[in-house]
Image: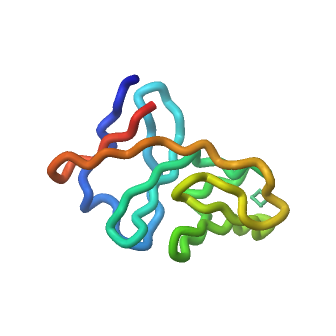
Amino acid sequence: MDKTCIGKMSDYPPGEIRPATLADGTALAVYNVDGRIYATADLCTHGEASLSEEGILTGCTVECPWHFGTFDVTNGRATAMPCTIPLKTYAVEVVDEDVYVQG
Ligand code: FES
């Protein structure tokens, strides 16, 4: 499976969400949870909200501000209504300071 370099660790500050794009154009939301990087699909599965632009990250939970649904960014699981469909997650690898996403 292809992997895409999406930048440096310093591009993803702890506790923050940033956008990234895979080589095939797939939009991602990238999260730094206590120094670990996680990547999911950018769009909330309930509507069309961009989690990288509008999501609120608390611990490993991202809240979608449109209708206050939440997901666990470590595994994509929907954890609060109205979200029921999991977010697609992507494997992340950090080599030196470079961040790679499989996909
Ligand atoms: Fe995200 Fe509705 S669009 S909770």
Q: Which residue is nearer to you in this view: 94 or 49?
A: 94
Q: Is residue 88 above or below residue 2?
A: below
Lateral position of residue 60 relative to residue 18, left or right: right
Q: Position of residue 11 (x, y in %)?
A: 30, 58
Residue displayed at 43% across by 73% down:
15
Q: What colouring does the structure picture have?
A: rainbow
User: As displayed, is residue 63 above or below residue 53?
Assistant: below
Which residue is at a point 26% across and 49% down the rendered structure image?
94
Residue 52 placement: quadrant: bottom right
Residue 59's x, y, as percent?
51, 75
Image quarter of the C terminus: top left
List the single residue furthest toward the right.
82
- Ligand 1 falls in quadrant: bottom right
Determine the residue located farthest toward the bottom in the rendered image. 58
Quadrant where the image shows the N terminus: top left
Q: How many marks?
A: 0
Q: Is residue 51 left or right of residue 20?
A: right
Residue 32 vertical position relative to residue 59 in the rendered view, above or below: above
Q: Nearer the viewer, residue 13 or 88?
A: 88
What residue lies at 36% left-to-right and 62% top-to-bottom? 36
Residue 85: x %, y % from top left: 76, 48
Q: Is residue 33 above or below residue 46?
A: below
| Left or right: where 77 falls relative to 81 | left
Nearer to us in this view, 93 or 11: 93
Position of 64 with respect to 30 (left or right) is right
Question: Which residue is located at x 60 percent, y 57 percent?
Answer: 51
